[in-house]
Image: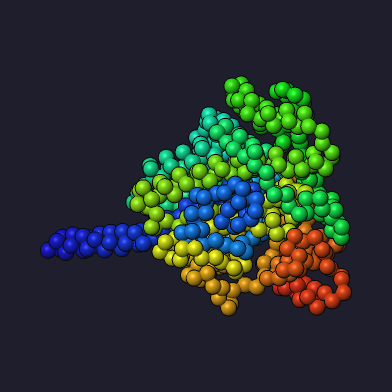
Amino acid sequence: RNNIKHSLLVYIAWVVSLSSYGQTNAQRPNVIFIMSDDHAEQAISAYGHPISQKAPTPHIDRIANEGALFLNNYCSNSICGPSRAAILTGKHSHKNGFMRNGNKGFDGTQQTLPKILQQNGYETAIIGKWHLISKPTGFDHWEILNDQGDYYNPYFITERDTVRRMGYVTDLITDLTKDWLANRDKNKPFFLMMHHKAPHRNWVPAERHYKLYENTVFPVPETYFDDYEGRYAAAQQEMNIYRDMYEGHDLKMVTGIDSDTLLYDPWPHAFLETMTPAEQERFFAAYRDRNNDFYTTMRTEKEKALWKFQRYMQDYLATVKSVDESVGEILDYLKANGLDKNTIVIYTSDQGFYLGEHGWFDKRFMYEESFGMPLLMSYPKHIKPGIKIDGLTQNIDFAPTLLDLCQIATPDDMQGRSFKALLQNGRTPKDWRKSLYYHYYEYPGFHSVRAHYGVKMERYKLMHFPKENLWELYDIKKDPSEIENIFGKKGTAKITQKLQQELLMLQDKYEVDNEYR
Ligand code: SGN
Ligand code: CA
């Protein structure tokens, strides 16, 4: 009798566990987190910027049409590794330890979003750019690009080996992602990060897109010939399109008519030499007419600067085209496999980027273009299609939000906040945050942007360059391009004081050491 009773209990326990396990798993959403590298909001047509209207991204826009478009999402530190670390940990740079790109690897022993999801029954994977030096932790499967990753025939690293895959990086990452989706453990919900290299420097398009925007004329930003008056740090940078771009490496310019030799390219191993000889030939052939045109038409310095802007935009947006196609393929895959209803889809970039504003490429500054971070998110069960979200959100919020949506408790030491409440109808609850904290540390470093930190509120932004002890204050509403530094100007004392107080409050709240204030 005891035996029968025992088997009966075991059976009941089994049925109960099965049903509750099965049920939670059925209810728990999958998450696909798509992140590209250096993709500016100005180059996503859902955001409506004039540049993107010349080079639309219909597939990425689908995510906003079916879900939410975030109008005020920002990063915490506008540079690759640090933004990725903030996303993984839900913490600012000074807390997760990855403050700048560099030799010191991410501390993978700390708590991260994929680890928590994994511990709660999720199957986790990352495919594509990682750039955190140490090996990924918390992933059941990972296949990452070597360092920055090459556009053509890149090396991928796995737990077991390093393999060179022949093809175009964006397409390879998409195929690897679809393979993983097809072969994953289908009894578990999944968390999948697909991280593209594109549209990172040096903007090499897929062959099918070399000539895509050859004849497109992109609108030149009003601040293209900025004189940086009143902005010391903005004047010091080395990220000017017409002064600092390498004509060979970045702009694919050659030495003369019909030449197949690039102008200055300090890193041929990371560009031309990654292509097969046949690929190199097709590359030069595709650019030949435009490169010849540069030499057959007389141009003033100013006209040359404008020519360079067009070349930069043509290439940058052609690499974006492949990313858009990739997103389309993944969305189609989800639909074809019945995964679209119960999957949270996120599209973002590690930070924003300059598309000629202030004459620049690259990022790093707390000015809107690079501080801003595109964010589009769909989840049919939860997000009303087509909503726009105004509230101030930040990359440190991604982890708490996803945990919240996956019905998993968020650890107290995460510094971000779940924005689930903003997703219902797009309205910002009264008690939502009123300010954001930012801190960029990488100086000295590439592009020579001085270290700075600051606070952004709805209308105003205050920035401090501690080493130079310089302050900048902007009224974003009146001066969206941030060309007039009003710090110390008449009538700004009160607002300055308010922002300085808010900054102190944030530094206390986020426990920023004196060393970094
Ligand atoms: C490379 C780029 C820089 C860029 C950094 C950081 N040069 O060094 O222009 O600022 O990466 O970018 S490159 O021409 O060799 O690519 S990040 O996205 O990794 O932060
Ligand atoms: Ca980046």
Q: Is residue 162 above or below residue 494?
A: above
Residue extending furthest left?
1
Provide residue 26's location: percent of width, then percent of height: 34, 59
Colour scheme in use? rainbow
| Residue sitting at x 68%, y 46% | 218
Tell me: 419 left or right of 264.
left
Which part of the image, by quadrant, shows the N terminus? bottom left
| Residue sitting at x 73%, y 49% | 220
| Residue sitting at x 87%, y 57% | 229
| Occupied quadrant, residue 170 | top right
Provide residue 499's location: percent of width, then percent of height: 75, 72
Instruction: Answer whether residue 508 is visible to the viewer in this image.
Output: no
Provide residue 13's location: percent of width, then percent of height: 25, 62
Instruction: Answer whether residue 381 is visible to the viewer in this image.
Output: yes
Provide residue 311's location: percent of width, then percent of height: 70, 39
Q: Nearer the viewer, residue 363 or 218?
A: 218
Q: Nearer the viewer, residue 450 or 52?
A: 52
